[in-house]
Image (tube, rainbow, N blue to C red):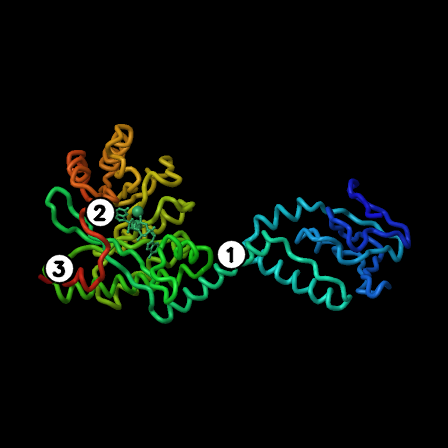
């Protein structure tokens, strides 16, 4: 009979069975003392799979992949075991990286197939949900390798979206937005691949790549349209900010392309779980080097006004979600208040996602300095931007 694990400690006498092949599991066990024998049936008689002793886990496989027991476990000597409930594993498995989970379940399934071949029994099928999840995790890992490859093949490109100075109607600068043209999937949205890159250290080479492209674009603008000096803002993710030498590395690239620091703006998105200390350091270093720093997507993330007064951002970018709903009096009240607050803090304001002339007129009335959005211009290739500037 399979043992119920209600106690925090289980004692087995020699010869006593802990569980049998075919049982439905709810518990794994940690062997505290004694030795257990693992056997499986082959042609009606037990075959020895191995012995386990103190410190080993037993019965964890079926608990991990929610399958029936594929072996029988019997005490060889007197044993003391600590039961570990399925929920304890499940909680950690759910919290684990999906790729790690997929690797574990794939190894488990391979072991089960080998065991079934050995015993001549039918293999235990993995639950449908597990295989679906594994395939999603593998999709992700595939996309990640393709992104690595794309970096080498230089398949990433930046597009420049114009930012307008509202009062004069003139071009102030651009935001660099990254595009990945995937050979099979077509254009992959940065919302998809940046998040993927942020999960691993891959965001660091992606960021370096984007920065290099931004510097190359600024160099081309300086060479072909020397009469204008637009800035280019680029997006930086939390992992990059964690690097204490980040600004120094930006400066290396700037020098290499003989670009002025004043033409570069760092955008940090508010929706990242920010480490305020690191950001304060980044802003300090950037200012020393002559670069500006913007707070992106303001109002969408973990807006912590308690920290804002300590962070000397040069610009606040109001998220497009607010601009899109300017007709709503409550949204309008928020935008007015943010513009007022930014002014009092000495920050410029960029309204993102400006799509209609009505919204632009309203923003002008509210005293917002800059606008970005499809009305002003869609993200364009560097070639197109340089050609327009050179006219
Ligand atoms: P973001 O920095 O807030 O960029 C603005 C996004 O709004 C861009 O989407 C842009 O194409 C879109 N947009 C601009 N004007 C309008 C408009 O009038 N209407 C609408 N509906 N949308 C508009 P995109 O290019 O898909 O980028 C999405 C996000 O991906 C960016 O949001 C940024 O957070 C991130 N991202 C893009 N490039 C990079 C990068 O090189 N590095 C990092 N770390 N993040 C990046
Ligand atoms: Mg941005
Ligand atoms: Mg934004």
Task: Decide: few, some or many residues near mark 3? Use Cα within 10 Å; few <14, some 14-19, many ≥20.
Answer: some
Q: Point out residue 302 in the picture as x, y percentages from the top left corner.
A: 40, 39
- Determine the secondary structure under disc 2: strand
Q: Of marks 3 and 2, which one's residue comes earlier in the chain?
A: 2
- Determine the secondary structure under disc 1: helix
Residue 193, quarter of the rendered image: bottom left
- Determine the secondary structure under disc 3: helix
Q: What residue occupies the far right of the structure in this picture?
A: 14
Q: Of marks 3 and 1, which one's residue comes earlier in the chain?
A: 1
Report the Cα–Cα distance between label 3 and label 1. 44 Å
**Residue situated in front as seen by the camera: 289 or 205:** 205
Q: Where is mark 1, residue-wise?
A: 136
Q: What residue is rendered at 64% in x and 56% in y?
A: 126
Residue 390, quarter of the rendered image: bottom left
Nearer the camera: disc 3 or disc 1: 1
Report the Cα–Cα distance between label 1 and label 2. 36 Å
Q: Where is mark 2, residue-wise?
A: 372
Task: Decide: few, some or many residues near mark 1? Use Cα within 10 Å; few <14, some 14-19, many ≥20.
Answer: some
Task: Decide: few, some or many residues near mark 2? Use Cα within 10 Å; few <14, some 14-19, many ≥20.
Answer: many
Q: Point out residue 37 in the picture as x, y percentages from the top left corner.
A: 83, 60
Q: Is mark 1 within 8 Å of ligand 1?
A: no
Q: What residue is rendered at 23% in x and 35% in y?
A: 339
Q: Is the residue under label 2 in contact with that under label 3 (CB below 8 Å)?
A: no
Disc count in the image? 3
Q: Is residue 301 left or right of residue 260?
A: right
Q: Of marks 1 and 2, which one's residue comes earlier in the chain?
A: 1
Q: Point out residue 144 in the picture as x, y percentages from the top left corner.
A: 45, 62
Q: Where is mark 3, residue-wise?
A: 389
Q: Is residue 224 left or right of residue 272?
A: left
Screen quadrant of the C terminus? bottom left
**Residue situated in front as seen by the camera: 40 or 173:** 40
Q: In this view, does 150 lie to the left or right of 9?
A: left
């Amino acid at each position: 009979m399979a043992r119920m694990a209600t106690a925090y400690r289980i004692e087995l006498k020699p010869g006593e069975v802990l569980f049998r092949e075919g049982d439905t599991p709810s518990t794994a066990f940690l062997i505290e003392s004694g030795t257990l024998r693992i056997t499986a049936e082959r042609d009606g008689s037990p075959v020895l799979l191995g012995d386990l002793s103190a410190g080993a886990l037993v019965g964890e496989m079926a608990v991990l992949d929610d399958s029936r027991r594929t072996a029988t476990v019997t005490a060889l000597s007197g044993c003391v075991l600590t039961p570990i409930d399925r929920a304890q594993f499940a909680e950690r498995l759910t919290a684990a990286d999906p790729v790690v989970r997929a690797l574990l379940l794939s190894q488990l399934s391979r072991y089960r197939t080998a065991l079934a071949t050995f015993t001549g029994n039918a293999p235990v099928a993995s639950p449908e949900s597990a295989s679906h999840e594994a395939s999603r995790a593998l999709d992700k890992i595939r996309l990640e390798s393709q992104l690595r490859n794309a970096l080498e093949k230089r398949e990433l490109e930046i597009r420049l979206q114009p930012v307008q100075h509202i009062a004069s109607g003139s071009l102030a600068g651009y935001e660099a937005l990254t595009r990945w043209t995937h050979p099979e999937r077509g254009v992959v949205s940065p919302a998809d691949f940046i998040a993927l890159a942020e999960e691993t250290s891959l965001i660091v080479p992606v960021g370096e790549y984007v920065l290099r492209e931004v510097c190359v674009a600024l160099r081309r603008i300086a060479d072909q349209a020397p009469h204008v000096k637009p800035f280019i803002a680029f997006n930086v993710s939390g992992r990059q900010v964690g690097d204490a030498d980040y600004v120094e590395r930006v400066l290396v690239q700037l020098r290499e392309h003989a670009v002025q620091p004043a033409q570069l703006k760092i955008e940090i998105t508010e929706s990242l779980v920010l480490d305020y200390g690191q950001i304060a350091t980044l802003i300090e270093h950037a200012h020393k080097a002559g670069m500006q720093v913007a707070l992106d997507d303001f109002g969408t993330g973990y807006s912590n006004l308690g920290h804002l007064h300590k962070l000397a951002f040069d610009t606040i970018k109001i998220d497009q979600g607010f601009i899109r709903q300017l007709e709503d009096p409550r949204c309008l009240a928020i935008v007015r208040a943010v513009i007022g607050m930014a002014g009092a803090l000495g920050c410029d304001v960029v309204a993102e996602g400006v799509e209609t002339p009505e919204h632009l007129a309203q923003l002008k009335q509210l005293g917002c300095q800059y606008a970005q959005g499809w009305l002003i211009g869609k993200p364009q290739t560097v070639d197109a931007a340089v050609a327009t500037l050179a006219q």
